[in-house]
Image (spheres, rainbow, N blue to C red):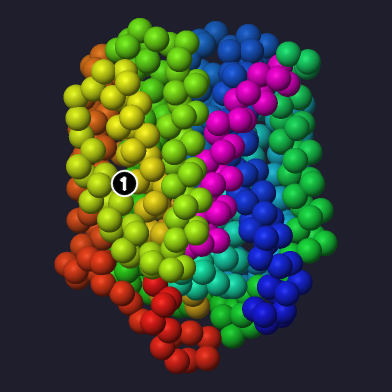
Amino acid sequence: MSDNRAKALLGFSEFVALAAAMMATQAIAIDAMLPALPTIVHGLAVGNENHGQWVVTAYMTGLGLGQLFWGLVSDRFGRRRVLLTGLALYITAALLCGLSVSFHALLGWRFLHGLAAASVTVTRSVIRDLYSGRHMARVMSLTFVVFLTIPMVAPSLGELILTIGNWRDIFIVCGAFAAAVWIWAFLRLPETLHPEYRMMLTPQHIGAAVRLVLGNRTSLGYALAMTVMFGSLLAYVGMVQQIFADTFHRASLMPLMFALCAAFMGLAAFFNSRLVERLGMRPISHTALHTLVAALGIEQLGTFVALQSATMACVGFSTANFGAMAMEPVGSVAGVAASLQGFISTFGAALVGALIGREFNGTTLPLAAGALLCGLASLACVLGAERGRLFRRHHTPNEAGTLDAASV
């Protein structure tokens, strides 16, 4: 099915909503579970309360490894088939998690749950199949808004489920939501992979695709820039509870302030979707990156929230554009590109976040210094991708083969 027919079948708004819903299945499986971890530990008679974190770790391990697989096979068998298969496996794993009778069984099914959730990485390939340049950045920004909203509301959803049911019901709700998304995709999502881009799964073809993705300066540079920025974000998520409890002694304010800071990132992503087609990905994201590097400060509670909100707004203006620019030059192997970039960003960001988080010393300085270093590292990656020149406009071929000056 051609790009134009695929776009006509769904329409822009429905496609963005479906893409966001598919990506939300990945986020809700993490964040809705957080309030239930102590209950799970107690319910399955786990001796060490800290082992409850393994429920998240098992999922994240599967998520990271799975990204190397799903995008690759989608370049061979098509996006639609892979997405539907992955979502079906996600639903099965979620239900089996809810039926687990031992902690080890739960961890095994959670690994499979994450492995299946990684299939929604293919959504980035679908976006690249249908859109390029600024239009792709707009779609990614809009889906990013939903992806950022989930962490704000999912823990509350988990708490609500616990008040009327038990921790097993959270997995049931995850499975039910994914089932609704599966039905929507089955009925409305066409195949988007260009027939000429179908790849044979031979070592030679796979190796050539990997070399194309990792050997492209723009693709690799912006993927790494996105990775370190996400690492800074994960460090904040990991340290925020300790900062409000131990540094400011206002633990009760953490959920509200966390939501406030995340809201600024979501608003930035939304405004990016409105501006990027007029101003371009590079001017917006490069400006935001410069602002991020300048955001280091010594703060009290009010200034911490203000500066953290500004920092996260810069992340909102940058990451969707970075993701779009990383995918832009590798459209012929979009599945492999989504796999490799997703794998790098997941494990790389987790490592960066852990390195910053372990330096917490009762003050906000490690987080601020980590954000500064991540901003500088991201700027270095962007400079490498752009051969030392920022803010320049790029001219890329459009579908007709002519140059499109407004693409990026």
Classify residue 108 as left or right of residue 348: right
Whether residue 346 is situated above or below residue 167 in the rendered picture: below
The one of 22 and 302 positioned closer to us in this rendering: 302
Residue at the spot x=69%, y=55% of the render?
18
- The residue that disc 1 covers is 228
Q: Quadrant of residue 95?
A: top right
Residue at the spot x=73%, y=74% of the render?
8
State the image coordinates of residue 368 (x, y, percent, origin top left): 24, 31
The one of 380 and 96 positioned closer to us in this rendering: 380
Question: Element under label 1?
Answer: helix
Classify residue 343 as left or right of residue 150: left
Residue 186 appearing in the image: yes
Question: What quarter of the picture does the C terminus occupy?
Answer: bottom left
Amino acid of disc 1: Val
The one of 326 and 291 positioned closer to us in this rendering: 291
Residue 405 lies in the magenta-colored region: no
Residue at the spot x=55%, y=31% of the render?
152
Mark 1: few, some, or many residues within 10 Å (few <14, many ≥20)? Answer: many
Question: What quarter of the picture does the N terminus occupy?
Answer: bottom right
Classify residue 302 as left or right of residue 115: left
The stretch of residues the image draws in magenta is 137-162
Q: Quadrant of residue 302?
A: top left
The one of 209 and 263 positioned closer to us in this rendering: 263
- The secondary structure that dominates the magenta segment is helix
Residue 159 lies in the magenta-colored region: yes
Residue at the spot x=81%, y=53% of the render?
183
Whether residue 357 is situated above or below residue 186 in the rendered picture: above
State the image coordinates of residue 360 (x, y, percent, origin top left): 26, 21
Number of numbered callouts drawn: 1
State the residue lying farthest toward the left: 388
Residue 326 appearing in the image: no
